[in-house]
Amino acid sequence: MAEPNTAAQPSQEFEKVLVNSSTEVASFDTHDKTPLQKIQHFLHSTPAAVPFVVLVVSILVFGLAIGGRFFSSYTLTLILQQIAVVGMLGAAQTLVILTAGIDLSIGVIMVISAVVMGNCAVTYGLPAPLAVAAGFVVGGACGLLNGLLVSRLKLPPFIVTLGTWYVIMSTNFIYSENATIREADVTAVTQWLHVFGVTFKVGAAVLTLGVVAMVVLVFGLWYALNHTAWGRHLYAVGDDPEAAKLSGIRVGKVLLSAYTIAGLIAALAAWVSIGRNGSISPSAAVTDYNLQAITAAVIGGISLFGGRGSILGTLIGAMIVGVVSMGLNMLGADPQWKVFLTGVLIISAVAIDQWIRKVAA
Amino acid sequence: MAQEPILTARGLVKRYGRVTALDHADFDLYPGEILAVIGDNGAGKSSMIKAISGAVTPDEGEIRLEGQPVHFRSPMDARAAGIETVYQNLALSPALSIADNMFLGREIRKPGLFGKLFRTLDRSAMEKMARSKLSELGLMTIQNINQAVETLSGGQRQGVAVARAAAFGSKVVIMDEPTAALGVKESRRVLELILDVRRRGLPIVLISHNMPHVFEVADRIHIHRLGRRLCVINPKEHTMSDAVAFMTGAKTPPGEAIAA
């Protein structure tokens, strides 16, 4: 503490009584907390803890209900294969949600990127690297468009991406004439578009390169979000854009980068989805990839109000959905129960987020 | 004052449509002093402070820092020149840690390959510096520098914002209403902080509506009225009632005060 000085001897009449009072005000001590408050603090500093517990519990519950079949590494890795695409889209969505935005167009960006990759390779006969690059250009350009509309024209992200969702979806149908590119046609031209479908074995576990790509992507983004200035700025912008601006962060640039990178990740997810599905279908655009990606992020503890959550949570969120749907499948339950449970999980996740936000000193 | 002022402004004009917020306003800040800026609402004091801190660009007039003309186009420019501002809303990011907040917008990267290639942040260097800056200002009974700012009390947050300004402000620190949102005891602590910062040799511009606080810590008081500097008074020679009277136009300031 600084030594007593003139200011410590209040010169104002009404403050004279303060001399004998406690001077502990601005110290950072933490007083005793109830166990519940301790949990709240722990969750506040470790946002991926809740989804992690939910994941472990759901694996245990389904494991007990189904038995050894569920615990086999084959089943567990099959779940990973099934969530690779949604996990990647969820990661893209996470970047945007962290800025307090939302990207409703992420699913159709993926589909149009896949269609462009397929058409370039099969219809135009371009070499595979060029076809893939064309897909990334389209995905990145769609993301850039979202980013420009949000950061330059300052339109609300919900409206911008709702609009681009329709625009990109219809462009996709018009451009592709809703023609599916068959797996055999792709395979006849190149193996490269299916590279992420390549499987390999680690013991009894069967993994695809797509799963590896998802894990590498998520950990790469985790590193960028937590250990680079760009990541810290992304959180700051989502948390309080005004404060971020006054702290010297170029808010527009950060937003632009978030939407553009989300578009590029969608293109990568497109490549992975070609590997998984074999064929390329423009009508995949009607699948609710957007909502699945948002669901993974929200269940994973990413706050829709921005600035809070860990991208590892999104990966866990996607796994939770994967585990629940696989478990219910194996139990032979009506698939609607999966949808039902997803709804329950989303509402619980947001309720827990609100509670954690109320953390007090 | 025999010394040269460190920061001066001459003939600042800022118009917003038909409203003239600054009407040829002047401003002088001398090294090592606390200059309070007071004025009624709408007198243009915040426009003047924004011009000095780079948040607005004046339409006319000249700002000089250590005798050199400066043209700030953004708060970044002013910061680069050594002028730090503690905003009334503190400009802290609630979910980020104390250390992250102190280095927001000017993070330190690791030396060598990791910093260049992967742009890795040097967490330990930033935490160390944040900790030492907070201790210098006597704020260091803190246990966890990685605590999120939103878990701190109002006075603690103000402390972090002041420490950030004092750590990076090499020439001038501007504080906008630092005690406005605080309780009596926390205000007291922040006033001590302000005096601490002055002891370290940094001149401070203090914008405040709180007359007792202003009269307690300020060396000189700049009274703003109708978009320009009305006068500069010595708090030891005038009473609070005088200041309020000058500020509202109820009384005309003495001739020598205008020259000060």
Image: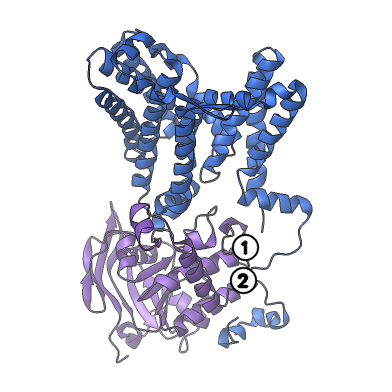
Please, which residue is most extreme toward the bottom here?
B2
Q: Residues within 10 Å of mark 1 (few under 14, many from 20)?
A: some
Whether residue B72 is visible: yes
Identity of the residue drawn at 64% across and 14% down? A335
In the image, residue B92 lies at what x, y percent? 49, 58
Task: State left or right for residue A111 relative to residue A238.
Answer: left
- Determine contact: label 2, label 1, CB under 8 Å: yes
Numbered tag placed on residue B153 in the rendering: 1
Q: Which residue occupies the foreground of this view, A351 or A339?
A: A339
Kind of residue sitting beneath label 1: Ser
Q: Secondary structure at mark 2?
A: helix
Rendered image quadrant of residue A331: top right
- Which chain does the residue under circle 1 lie in? B
Q: Is residue A332 above or below residue A25?
A: above
Q: Is residue A83 above or below residue B235?
A: above
Q: Earlier in the sequence, mark 2 or mark 1?
A: 1
In the image, residue B231 lies at what x, y percent? 35, 79
Q: Which residue occupies the foreground of this view, B238 or B25?
A: B25
Task: State left or right for residue A296 relative to residue A334.
Answer: left
Whether residue B137 is visible: no
Q: Is residue A306 above or below residue A273?
A: below
Identity of the residue drawn at 23% across and 22% down? A127
What colour do you see for chain B?
Answer: purple
- Which chain does the residue under circle 2 lie in? B
What colour do you see for chain A?
Answer: blue
Q: Secondary structure at mark 1?
A: loop
Q: What residue did someone put label 2 on?
A: B186
